[in-house]
Image (tube, helix red, strand yellow):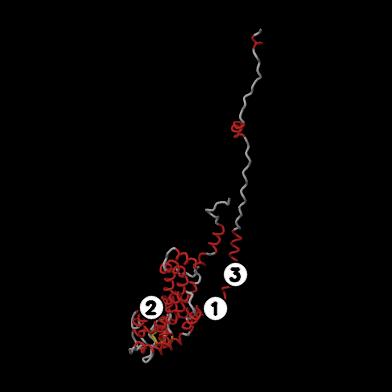
Amino acid sequence: MNGRAGRVSSPRVRPVVSSRLIARKTEPFMTTSAPAAAPPRAKPAPKNRIRRAHRGEGRLAALLLSPTLLVLALVIGYPLVSALRGSLYQRGEGLDANGFVISGEHFVGLRNYTDAFTGANGSRFWNAFGNTTFFTVTSVVLETVIGLAMALIMHHALRGRALLRASILVPWAVPTAVSGLLWRWVFDANGIANNLLGQQILWSADGWPAKCAVVIADTWKTAPFIGLLTLAGLQLIPAELHEAARVDGANAWIRFRKITLPLIKPALLVAVLFRLLDVLRMFDLPYLLVGNQKYSVQTLSVLAFNEANNLHYGPAAAYATLLFVYVVIVAYAFVKILGADLLAGARTRTPARRRRSATRPLAGRGTPA
């Protein structure tokens, strides 16, 4: 038998290749589906359109404010410029450049200002400056403390709270002239104050009793003003903050220092700023309560009034100008140091900053999933 015939022929077996292997080998050559296109970004508005929109807002604001600015220019700007001009002149008789006697107004430059600080009028000016500063510091501090205490008392749910809030408005609603005459009767030599103290104190005489009388009368009249503004700030504080702090174990002092005081700070600072500007210009209360020509209560306003009443218009205008500068410096320092800037919001949203904020992309935000 042939050897080739003795062999059994078997069919050819093809190697079985796993589908996973084929897929793995052909994966680099397979085409994948294209990724989903990102959603189109909203195109920012053109800069020219934004600029025109803000320019229109500025024109509208200027148009609406123009009547107010015109009235302020008439009632404030003109007297201020007139006072500045009058402080550079002196009325009376003098000598011209040729040595002849002239009468009327003549230009003296800054002589009225130098005479206010030095010379015969120097002591009067510094006394009035010291009295003005003393009344401002003592009155504002006492009014702030008493007004804050009054606001805290009125804020609590007490019986008769509405009557208390209405009665606290009475001293503030009374005109200053009436208040001065009322307290003049109280501080009379035979008045209520001496009867309660059991002593004979001359409150209307010159000296420290007169200063104390002015401070007491001014504090009685204007402490409710600070109390009402502070009460408005207290009513805006959510009750949940105090409840959460009470649950955490905070006592009343900690809650007042950490929650109440920081949240009422803007309203309190605005009230104090208004009182500062008011006390620095104090005139009617010491004039009516103690009287004119009293050295211990003479303020800068009273000094300027007395000079103008004696027909010394140049020195009077100089005193008024110095008082204006003093008020501006105190207000500016108060705003910068304590942060009671009433124009902060308007200054941070100028048109240039609004344009930059509108065209600036949102950084640090991921796309939504």
Q: CA distance from mark 2 to mark 3?
A: 44 Å
Residue appearing at x 60%, y 34% in the figure: 27
Indicate the amino acid at tag 1. Val
Mark 2 / mark 1, whichever is N-terminal: 1
Please, what secondary structure does the residue beneath circle 3 have?
helix
The numbered disc on residue 71 is: 1
Indicate the amino acid at tag 3. Leu
The residue at which mark 3 appears reads as: 60
The residue at which mark 2 appears reads as: 138
Foreground pick, 235 / 105: 235
Q: CA distance from mark 3 to mark 1?
A: 18 Å
Q: Is residue 198 left or right of residue 345?
A: left
Question: Count of labels shown?
Answer: 3
Quadrant showing the N terminus: top right
Residue 300, x across and y down, in percent: 40, 81
Indicate the amino acid at tag 2. Thr
Mark 3 / mark 1, whichever is N-terminal: 3
